[in-house]
Amino acid sequence: MTLPKSTPPDNILRLAIKDEWDCVVWYGEGELTSGGISGWQKWSTYEVDWGAEDVWMPSQNNEGDVSLCASKSSGDRHLIWLSLKVDSDFWYVMYQKSTDGGVTWSNPVALAEEYYISCLRIQGASNGYLFVSYFMYQDDLDDEWVRVLRSTDRGSTWTQVADLGAEWERQDLQIDSNDRIYVTAMKADDNDNIGCWTWYSDDYGSSWQGPYNLTPLPPVEEGGDIDGWSMKTELDSQGILHVICKSDDRLPVHYNWNGVEGEGPHQIHTKEFSFFSHVPTFTLDGDEIFAFWFDQAPHDESDVHKVWYSHSPDRGVTWDVNHALEEEALWNDWGLVEGDQGSPACLFYSDLVCYIMSASDTDLKDPTGIYAYISDDGGSTWIDSHLDSDLDSEWLQPAVATYFTSQQACTYFLLA
């Protein structure tokens, strides 16, 4: 079976963590086990220097502000994160690289400067090319589009290769095992029905096909609302693109697209919730999919929130729905699941399913910081592991690494 390129090569959790409160970015690794994360260690990739000429401040728009990818065949780690800069009105996409497995990192470099940026994604192709995509608009607010950047030299230099469409909302990036690159975004059609559409490139971003409709029955009807980071995509081992997004009642639904036509929506919930769902995210392995989202408890008017999940054994056709990671409430009022802002917030290795989240000091979770929820029995039971007592900031955003197999470049010499 051909595995998706993002399939972890081992049971090591590789995690980037952006700390907006202390203006620090971290990279950490630990062994994923059924009992928790073992041997966790972390290194700082960036710490703010208030005396520098350019003062970068890791910041958040609450819409995917940090993204990490790693090579399966080398120690390369590639990291992007959203930043503000002192004395500037713009947002920036910052890029860093490690060649020794995350111990040391290059100084951050600004890849983009825009009036507004969100939904940052970085992925690698098998030839070593890197791709960054993000949602943006400029100060006139007339055009909203997805921009794609490419590096052909392992991150040393970058070139803009695409501006995809106008008046688009949100975006996500995937690369399959044949190096087909997918960029998916949300948009309203001529009847104001909001759906998910994708472009793809078979020549490393030089040309693009699309957009193609992934949602034959749109998730949001006329007059609906898609406020918030409301869409996530993944590729399965057969090259089928899966998407989970919000429906018109703001609850998550699943679609898939085989390159010709889309199927869905498949309900991954019941209509019991009385508040909005926040940032659906999911992970898959073989035929199985685990989807997570944050919402208020059913028919509860006290603003007590939980993380919910649903499981599909057949690539999204049927779902076992609406299970809570913990029976007790995790949040009061507006304590959000910041883990969902990463890309992705969960991973699936062998029989281990792991969901990563951040608990701030507004939550009922004590102590604050990064938590890993792990199940080794298909989601029947979960254990929660507090990752690091040093990570106690109010605003932490984690991102689990995606993976690619990079071919090493070779030079041949003809000797006389």
Image (tube, rainbow, N blue to C red):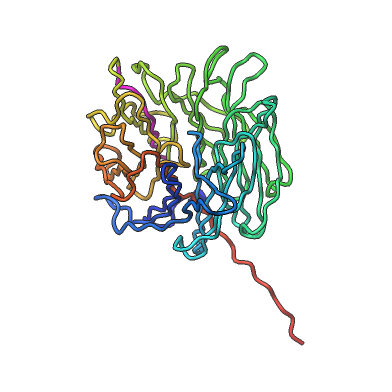
Q: What residue range appears in magenta?
A: 287-298
Relative to 76, residue 88 above or below: above
Horizontal side of 27 relative to 217 (left or right) equals left
**With respect to residue 308, does 75 lie above or below?**
below
- Residue most extreme to the front: 51
What's the residue at 36%, 33% (across, down)? 311
Q: Residue 158: percent from the left, percent from the top?
A: 67, 52
Say whether residue 289 is visible: no
Q: Is residue 292 magenta?
A: yes
Res. 364 in view: yes
**Picture coordinates of residue 414 (x, y %)?**
74, 81
Q: Who's the residue at 41% across and 35% down the image?
A: 314
- Give coordinates of residue 9: x percent, y percent: 44, 57
Quadrant where the C terminus is found in the figure:
bottom right
Seen from the viewer's position, the closer of residues 375 and 295 is: 295
Q: Quadrant of residue 407?
A: bottom right
- Nearest to the observer: residue 380 or residue 386: 386
Q: What x and y, as percent, mark residue 84?
A: 55, 41
Q: Left or right of 172: which side holds 360?
A: left
- Residue 138 covered by magenta stretch: no
> Count of labels shown?
0
Q: Residue at x 37, y 31 (%)?
A: 336
Dominant secondary structure, magenta: strand
Q: Would you say 218 lies left or right of 251 here?
A: right
* Residue sitting farthest toward the bottom: 416
Where residue 332 sits, quadrant-wise, is top left
